[in-house]
């Protein structure tokens, strides 16, 4: 979450959160229509550039973030590469059957997962949740009772984590720490979440009563402490994608790296 | 009674779901850790991602709760910087809608294992439809695809159905659920005497 890292703020942080969310959701749908591997790779590079250059993170941290992405790429791609349909056999070993078609399709899916991960993390790193919900209320007319509930719930996360620690210490003190054997693991997986859940529900109930008393559920027109607007930064954001996706399209179709036009079988 | 969800219902649903969102965030690495075992064993634990909807519905038992829960859990996971990125948000919404449809079909009256498992299976179908477009799973070898779908259904029933019912039973024993549910018929009868 943004609050966990202190980073340099730049234009990406100033883009209206609702607008940013709508844009990347549309990009998600757009990616589902890409069946050309060359275009998919170029598209991913365009998103990666945004992530590396404009999230305001240090290079060290960016490399740290990229590490699990490689794992995602591999694990998403592998089952399609090994077990996908195809005709031109490259390699066969037992159940594993790698074909040229399945190889390219696997890589395509890998890049897809990578581009979704990059878009999501770019959003999470450059958006403060509080401003997101203020913007959802003001630009997209989300009812305040939902938005304030979300904000309250997000504030409760650190308390939940603290409580989790407390429960673990309490179990340790009582000598219930053993995690050997399947039976114990099962017991553990029920005995920790239940007190966590019940305490959270009690706390949420108390907070809700207080919020109702303060008329957070009223539908009368509210005023807002943070005023969210559409600004020129939103147009920069939009133009970035139009420009780079256009460029990606141009490169992919004029100078293709791989002679594959459609990865579908 | 006023129409729709009260602020209490909304806040409790969202708090519980954000809790599940944290779990989902931790579930991601686990999912990738079991993946190398191959042959879609990872699909067996996929069902955990549908659980917020059914647990929240079992606690609150009102229309719209399942959908709200799944949206809240996925946005929690998303805002914490999930490895799956924007994908979780879209999947969460679709899975929530599919679970909600089943619960609606039973008019939000049934809370037995069968209906809750059906809601899980419905979410599972929603996720498979998205996988069909996103992951080209239709282009897997047929035996492999059957394994993939079969394991995911089993996982959906185990986690979303059985585990959710177990959690709810344990929660009922703690007494918190009585805070949230409107008084039962017995309570009103007791008042009339």
Image (cartoon, coloured by chain):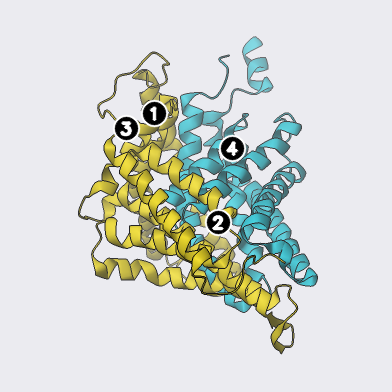
Chain colours: A yellow, B cyan
From the viewer's perspective, tell me whether residue B84 is left or right of residue B131: left
Q: Residue A219 in the image: x percent, y percent?
A: 43, 16
In-front residue for pair B137/A186: B137
Comes first in the chain, label 1 or label 2: 1
Badge 2 crowding class, 10 Å Cα cut-off, few under 14, some 14 to 19, many 20 or more, is: some
Q: Residue at x 50, y 69 (%)?
A: A72
- Residue extending farthest to the front is A254
Sequence-wise first label, 1 or 3: 1
Q: Are marks 4 and 3 on the same chain?
A: no
Are callouts 4 and 1 both on one chain? no
Q: Secondary structure at mark 3?
A: loop
Residue placed under numbered mark 4 in the picture? B67
Residue located beneath label 1 in the image: A139
Marks 1/3 same chain? yes
Total marks placed: 4
Q: Are marks 1 and 2 on the same chain?
A: yes
Sequence order check: which comes first, mark 2 or mark 3?
Answer: 2
**Real-space Cα distance between discs 2 and 3?**
47 Å
Which residue is disc 2 drawn over? A190
Mark 2 or mark 3, whichever is nearer to me = 3
């Amino acid at each position: 979450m943004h609050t966990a890292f202190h980073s340099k703020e730049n234009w990406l942080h100033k883009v209206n959160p609702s607008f940013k969310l709508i844009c990347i959701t549309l990009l998600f749908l757009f990616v589902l229509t890409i069946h050309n591997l060359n275009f998919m790779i170029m598209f991913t590079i365009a998103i990666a550039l945004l992530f590396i250059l404009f999230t305001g993170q240090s290079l060290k941290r960016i490399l740290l973030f990229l590490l699990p992405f490689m794992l995602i790429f591999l694990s998403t791609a592998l089952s399609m590469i090994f077990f996908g349909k195809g005709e031109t056999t490259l390699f066969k070993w037992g159940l594993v059957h790698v074909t040229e078609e399945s190889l390219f399709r696997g890589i395509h899916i890998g890049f897809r997962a990578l581009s979704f991960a990059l878009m999501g993390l770019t959003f999470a790193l450059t958006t403060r949740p509080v401003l997101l919900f203020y913007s959802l209320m003001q630009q997209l007319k989300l009812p305040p009772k939902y938005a304030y509930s979300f904000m309250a719930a997000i504030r409760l996360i650190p308390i939940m984590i603290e409580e989790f620690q407390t429960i673990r210490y309490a179990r340790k003190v009582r000598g219930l720490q053993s995690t050997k054997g399947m039976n114990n693991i099962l017991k553990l997986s029920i005995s920790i979440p239940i007190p966590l859940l019940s305490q959270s529900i009690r706390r949420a109930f108390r907070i809700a009563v207080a919020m109702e008393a303060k008329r957070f559920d009223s539908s009368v027109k509210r005023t807002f402490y943070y005023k969210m607007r559409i600004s020129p930064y939103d147009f920069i954001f939009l133009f970035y994608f139009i420009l780079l996706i256009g460029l990606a399209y141009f490169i992919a179709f004029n100078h293709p790296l791989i002679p594959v036009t459609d990865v579908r079988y | 009674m006023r129409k729709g969800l009260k602020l209490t219902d909304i806040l409790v649903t969202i708090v519980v779901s954000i809790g599940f969102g944290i779990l989902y965030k931790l579930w991601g690495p686990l999912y990738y850790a079991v993946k190398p075992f191959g042959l879609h064993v990872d699909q067996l634990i996929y069902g955990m991602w549908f659980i917020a909807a059914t647990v929240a519905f079992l606690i609150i038992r009102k229309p719209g709760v399942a959908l709200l829960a799944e949206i809240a859990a996925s946005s929690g996971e998303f805002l914490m910087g999930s490895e799956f990125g924007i994908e979780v948000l879209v999947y969460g919404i679709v899975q929530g809608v599919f679970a909600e449809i089943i619960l609606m079909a039973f008019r939000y009256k049934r809370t037995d294992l069968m209906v809750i498992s059906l809601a899980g299976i419905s979410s599972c179908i929603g996720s498979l439809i998205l996988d069909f477009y996103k992951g080209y799973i239709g282009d897997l070898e047929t035996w492999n695809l059957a394994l993939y779908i079969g394991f995911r259904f089993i996982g959906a029933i185990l986690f979303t159905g059985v585990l959710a019912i177990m959690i709810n039973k344990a929660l009922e024993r703690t007494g918190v659920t009585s805070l949230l549910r409107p008084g039962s018929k017995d309570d009103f009868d007791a008042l009339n005497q």
